[in-house]
Amino acid sequence: MASERHCHIWREWTLNSAPGLQALLQRAKRNVVVVALANKLARIAWAVMSKRHPYEAVTASEG
């Protein structure tokens, strides 16, 4: 089933992701975190497309 596969991918990805995301998952429900990440990605995509610049990530230590 597709949803089971996506759950497996989600678990794998979160295990290897940033500590900040893991901390957020402990404080908030998983679906809230998923929507927040989708919103962040949508804002990044919109900014990249509207400004016609390549995306340059800024880490927490830089910004």
Image (cartoon, rainbow, N blue to C red):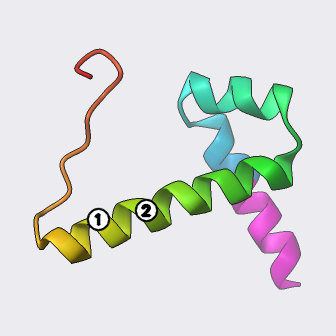
CA gap, disc 2 to disc 1?
6 Å
**Label 2 element class:** helix
In this rendering, is residue 42 above or below 63? below
- The three-letter code of the residue at mark 1 reads Ala
Left-right relation of 46 to 5: left
- Residue reaching furthest top? 61
Q: Position of residue 47 (x, y in %)?
A: 29, 65
Q: Residue at x 87, y 71 (%)?
A: 4
Q: Position of residue 9 (x, y in %)?
A: 69, 60
Q: Which residue is mark 2?
A: 43
CB atoms at circles 2 and 1 under 8 Å apart? yes
Q: Position of residue 46 (x, y in %)?
A: 35, 71
Q: Which one is in front, 17 or 36?
A: 36
Q: Position of residue 17 (x, y in %)?
A: 56, 36
Q: Which residue is mark 1?
A: 47
Q: Residue at x 68, y 48 (%)?
A: 12
Dominant SS in magenta: helix
Residue 18 colored in magenta in the image: no
Magenta stretch, residue numbers? 1-10
